[in-house]
Image (tube, grey):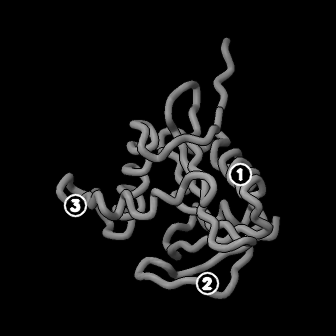
């Protein structure tokens, strides 16, 4: 019996797989916020594409994870300054959760942050995203003071690399 594996690699944010993953990410986090599945008309392309131009070297990186060849996970990094990289759009599709991909994704993002020259990784999230928060804490992130503000930012985390 063949063993299914995860493979993570940098990918442009505008590829079909990366675009579909970002759309699913947005649907998941916005759907949780509103307590229901979004309708097709509620997807906002400007929100889905916000800041994407920076998720490529030298300003950042975007990783896509494939499980048994299927696009299943993604995550981005954005350099905030010479020392800090921000994690963004960290997502594993529901059908692929529980298969170890989230831990591998976090490791890949930390490695990519180091390659970009970052010495610290930070992120912001919402309190209701409890699975994500547990993932960050499991990977050594601790709560830090707010380093930015926005309508969907409720808690901030950081980790020295």
Q: Is residue 13 left or right of residue 104?
A: left
Mark 2 surroundings: few (<14), some (14-19) or many (≥20) residues within 10 A: few
Question: Closest to the observer: 95 or 39?
Answer: 39
Task: Give the mark nearer the N terminus: 3 vs 2.
Answer: 3
Q: Which residue does the numbered mark 3 point to in the structure image?
A: 42
| SS category of the residue bearing label 2 | loop
- The residue that appears at 78% across and 57% down in the rendered structure is 114
- Looking at the image, residue 40 lies above or below residue 20: below
N-terminal-most mark, 2 or 1 = 1
Relative placement, left or right, of 136 versus 28 is right
Q: CA distance from mark 3 to mark 1?
A: 33 Å
State the CA–CA distance, disc 3 to disc 2.
Answer: 29 Å
Q: How many marks?
A: 3
Q: Position of residue 97 (x, y in %)?
A: 56, 44
Which residue does the image show at 45% across and 82% down from the upper left?
A: 150
Mark 1 falls on what kind of element? Answer: helix
Numbered label attached to residue 147: 2
Q: Quadrant of the N terminus?
A: top right
Locate residue 107, reporting x and y percent: 74, 50
Q: Nearer the viewer, mark 3 or mark 2?
A: 2
In primary-sequence order, the first of circles 3 and 1 is 3
Q: Nearer the viewer, mark 3 or mark 1?
A: 1
Residue in front for this viewpoint, 73 or 86: 86
**Which numbered tag is attached to residue 112?**
1
Q: Are marks 2 and 1 in contact (CB under 8 Å)?
A: no
Residue 129, percent from left and from top: 51, 67
Q: Residue sitting at 44 percent across and 77 percent down?
A: 152
SS type, badge 3: helix
The Cα–Cα distance between marks 2 and 1, rounded to whole angstroms, is 21 Å
């Amino acid at each position: 019996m063949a063993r299914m594996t995860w493979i993570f690699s940098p990918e442009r944010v505008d590829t079909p797989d990366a675009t579909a993953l970002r759309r699913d990410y947005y649907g998941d986090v916005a759907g949780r916020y509103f307590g229901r599945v979004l309708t097709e008309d509620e997807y906002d392309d400007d929100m889905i594409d916000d800041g994407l131009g920076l998720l490529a070297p030298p300003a950042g990186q975007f990783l896509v994870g494939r499980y048994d060849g299927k696009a299943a996970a993604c995550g981005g990094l954005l350099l905030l300054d010479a020392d800090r990289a921000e994690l963004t759009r960290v997502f594993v599709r529901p059908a692929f959760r529980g298969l170890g991909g989230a831990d591998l994704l976090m490791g890949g993002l930390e490695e990519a942050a180091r390659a970009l020259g970052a010495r610290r990784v930070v992120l912001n999230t919402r309190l209701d995203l409890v699975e994500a928060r547990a993932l960050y804490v499991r990977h050594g992130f601790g709560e830090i003071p707010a380093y930015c503000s926005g309508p969907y930012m409720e808690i901030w985390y950081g980790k020295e690399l």
